[in-house]
Image (tube, coloured by chain):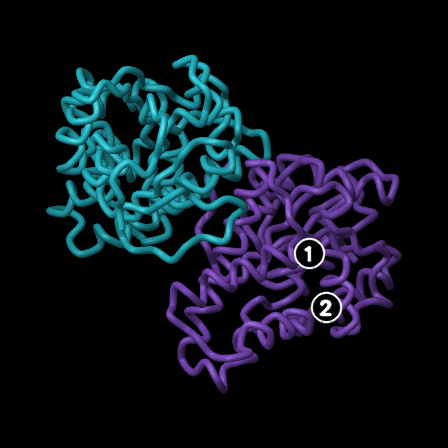
Chain colours: A purple, B cyan
Amino acid sequence: MAEGGRLQGIEVCVFDAYGTLFDVSSVARGAQAELGERWAALSELWRSKQLQYTWLRGLAGHHADFWQVTGDALDVSLATLGIEQPGLRDRLMALYLRIAAYAEVVPTLRALRAAGLKTAILSNGSPAMLEAAVNNAGLAPLLDAVLSVEAVGVFKPHPKVYGLAGMHFGVPVERICFLSSNSWDAYSAKAFGFQVLWCNRFGQAAERLPATPDGQIRQLDELPRWLGV
Amino acid sequence: MAEGGRLQGIEVCVFDAYGTLFDVSSVARGAQAELGERWAALSELWRSKQLQYTWLRGLAGHHADFWQVTGDALDVSLATLGIEQPGLRDRLMALYLRIAAYAEVVPTLRALRAAGLKTAILSNGSPAMLEAAVNNAGLAPLLDAVLSVEAVGVFKPHPKVYGLAGMHFGVPVERICFLSSNSWDAYSAKAFGFQVLWCNRFGQAAERLPATPDGQIRQLDELPRWLGV
């Protein structure tokens, strides 16, 4: 699917964090010993409620940071599934700070930096959550910036969030390649004006939202070829 | 759970439409003959994508009316489930205009009106969709107003939407009882300032959102006792 050099003029690669660089399912899987087979259902519901709460809070104007929203989403998910185990909530939240990076992340970031491109995260995550995850995965030396929505106090896909990347690097939006495995994030970032690749890890159907990403990749290591590097 | 007269000073009862007065699952169930067992999966995914698209469009500032969003959500749902049947999309959209009202809706609205209360719908639906559904279910003579988000050009839970009810009736928000079976709608309406009952038809767990409704009912016919009428 990828064609070498198909995206032109890119100076900065900006990555979504959760789902894109970091494997969200690794969190609940980390508690598989005590959750048993329920880990997958918990993982899916937790993620779904987490996103739902960001959109609802954003649209209603009731911002709270992603750490609180993640905990709230975990609470409603545990209650919905009838899971009650002493200390489990705290253990799962602690695992969120050590979320696993996908295997191709480090080599991809290295290849981009070696080609002279700048790299960054732009995420719903709070600064403390992002710092913990980035450090745990050894990504800090490979990133020029870690940008959090907390700078603008509203979640994706509010345009203010996407505006942070161009402002930080002082480059026009069309010189930024934005990557997300979250379809709605990729579509919304395209509507904002970035060049966008949707890292469609699970082969989802195309969304019916106002803008369509410039292309799809299955894993992040296909990115350098798209940039011709 | 209900206690007679627990909500005081109510002059107007405002109902969400889809899920609250109208049974959303009746739409795909209406095509059960051609969908077979897949009708339930389609129904659930269609509703989930429909709501997701309203929140994403609202937060990103890309409004389109609920008829378009409902069609977009149907398209992505059919593609996701691999359902391709000639004409099916149009038949399902036509069924949306004849969506079934829950059995207790007519007697409940009658009881409220007989007690001198005003009644209204406040819905994401476009005016044409709402008019079709209301007329099909015979609700027109039992409603003082049918209010659509199209008057403000953004979906629930944006506060502008909830503001429409007080403006229309010229009453303070605390004299309005808002009812929704959509948990997030009930919670957001409470944060706005209405007195709110969550018609929790399926026994869902409590949400973790900023405000909590004043109470829960299982069906709308419990409402008159809450109002002491």
Instruction: Decide if residue A206 is on the left or right side of residue A153.
Output: left
Coordinates of residue A12 in the picture (x, y in percent): 81, 49
Coordinates of residue A57 in the picture (x, y in percent): 57, 43
Residue in the image at 41% along x and 21% along y: B165
Q: Which mark is residue B30?
A: none
Residue in the image at 86% along x and 68% along y: A141
Which residue matches tag 2?
Answer: A133
Q: Nearer the viewer, residue B71 or B5?
A: B5
| Residue B198 picture quarter | top left
The crowding category of the residue bearing disc 1, from other C-alpha atoms within 10 Å (few below 14, some 14 to 19, many at least 20), is: many
| Residue A37 picture quarter | bottom left
Q: Is residue B86 positioned above or below A11 on the image?
A: above
Which residue matches tag 1?
Answer: A125
Q: Amino acid at mark 2?
A: Ala
Q: Nearer the viewer, residue A14 or A218?
A: A14
Q: Quadrant of the C terminus of chain B?
A: top left
Residue in the image at 22% along x and 54% along y: B38
Q: Earlier in the sequence, mark 1 or mark 2?
A: 1
